[in-house]
Image: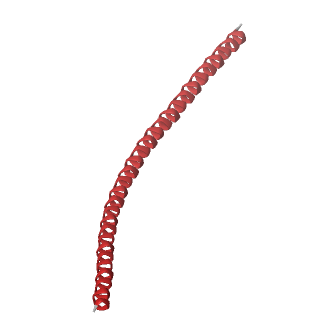
């Protein structure tokens, strides 16, 4: 009879250990599931932040490129105006010199 009670005691201890291991395993599974859900939410949030940051950077680069293009256009237009002004000034100067030369040559032929 003592052997029977001893066996029942050992079996009850083994069953308690087994049940506690099952409960511990379930707790770990639930905790891992919650951690996985938190990771998914964190990943989605990080992804949205990165998309927003990317869009902001893209918008900022586009603004800088537009300003750069405007600056280039203004510089090119300024250079063209300067070239036109210099050309007109040189043509005017050349015309004056030619007129002066022609007047001198006409005057010299008259004398």
Above-or-below relation of 11 to 90:
below
Q: List x then y, in percent, for residue 102.
A: 66, 17
Q: Residue at x 43, y 42 (%)?
A: 66
Observer-nearest of 97 and 73 = 73
Specify the quadrant of the image occupied by residue 32. Answer: bottom left
Q: Quadrant of residue 108?
A: top right
Q: Quadrant of the N terminus?
A: bottom left
**Residue plotted at (33% across, 82% down):** 14
Camera-nearest residue between 100 and 29: 29
31 or 45, nearer to the observer: 31
> Where in the figure is residue 86, as x and y percent of width and height?
58, 25
Q: Residue 57: x and y, percent? A: 41, 47
| Residue farthest toward the front in the current orientation of the protein | 2
Compared with 13, 61 (above or below) is above
Which image quadrant is residue 7 in? bottom left
Does residue 72 sit above or below 57 in this rendering? above
């Amino acid at each position: 009879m003592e052997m029977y009670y001893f066996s029942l005691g050992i079996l009850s201890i083994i069953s308690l250990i087994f049940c506690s291991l099952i409960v511990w395993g379930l707790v770990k599974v639930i905790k891992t599931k919650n951690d996985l859900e938190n990771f998914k939410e964190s990943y989605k949030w990080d992804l949205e932040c990165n998309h927003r940051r990317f869009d902001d950077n893209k918008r900022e680069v586009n603004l800088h490129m537009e300003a750069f293009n405007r600056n280039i256009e203004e510089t090119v237009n300024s250079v063209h105006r300067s070239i036109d002004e210099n050309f007109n000034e040189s043509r005017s100067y050349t015309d004056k010199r030619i007129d002066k030369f022609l007047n001198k040559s006409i005057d010299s032929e008259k004398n």
